[in-house]
Amino acid sequence: MKTMKWISIALLILSHPAPAQMNTPASALSIREVIDAWITNTENHLVPVANAMPEDKYSFAPSNGEFKNVRTFAEQLKHLAANNYRQAAVILGEKPTADQINEQGSDSVRTKAEIVGYLKGSFASLHRAVATINEKNEVEPINGTSGTWQRARLGLAIDAMAHSFDHYGQVVEYLRINGIVPPDSR
């Protein structure tokens, strides 16, 4: 019993940083690094959910209750990916495609593998776009945009993450309705 007590105390001491470590200032991060880390975080939540749903359930849309005209699981993923591509294009000063503007994604993207690839590609586009954000252009208004939060590169990047997590909440429910425990809950 005494041995267990000492082992517990030793583990407790070893698990806490030494006072010198706690006072070491962390190096400053750029906004670009913080946003890029959040894009990675968002991707790390959504891609496993996309992979968790069986392909035969990608056409699933809830029907019990107030679910009239809601998107299918596949349409949810394509919608959020198309928005990511659109936001990345605007950040980069490129013209988004029609399927990015209407946020439906390409009609040619149909299978689970294609949709997961499209989703992953959208995050890769966001990473590329965010790599171009710097102190000079992060809040500089972009021609052709409107509103306060979507007029600047920083706002567009934040919008892409917030929008993705909005749909994350929805697709997680689609998994649960189908008896699938979401990856983050396992």
Image: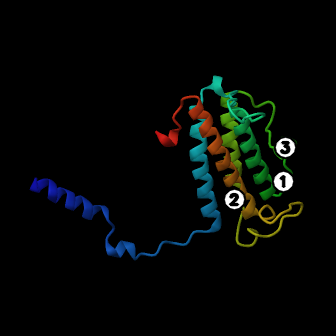
Badge 2 amino acid? Ile
Q: Mark 1 falls on what kind of element?
A: loop
Instruction: Name the image quarter holding residue 115.
Output: top right
How busy is the neighbourhood of tag 2: few (under 14 within 10 Å), some, or many (20 plus)? some
Q: Which residue is mark 3?
A: 102
Q: Which residue is mark 1?
A: 94
Q: Give the CA separation, mark 2 to mark 1.
A: 18 Å
Q: Mark 3 falls on what kind of element?
A: loop
Residue at screen point 58% across, 28% down: 178
How busy is the neighbourhood of tag 3: few (under 14 within 10 Å), some, or many (20 plus)? few
Badge 1 amino acid? Glu
**Residue 121 pos. (x, y %):** 69, 42
Q: Residue furthest front?
A: 65
Residue at screen point 51% across, 72% down: 27
Q: Is residue 141 above or below residue 85?
A: below
Residue 87 seen in this snapshot: yes
The tag earlier along the polypeptide, 2 or 3, is 3
Labels in figure, total: 3
The residue nearer to you, when weighing 72 against 118, is: 72
Q: Give the CA separation, mark 1 to mark 3.
A: 16 Å
Q: Which residue is mark 2?
A: 158
Q: Give the CA separation, mark 2 to mark 3.
A: 19 Å
Q: Is residue 64 above or below residue 35?
A: above
The tag earlier along the polypeptide, 1 or 3, is 1
Closer to the camera: disc 1 or disc 3?
Answer: 3
Residue 92 seen in this snapshot: no
Closer to the camera: disc 2 or disc 1?
Answer: 2
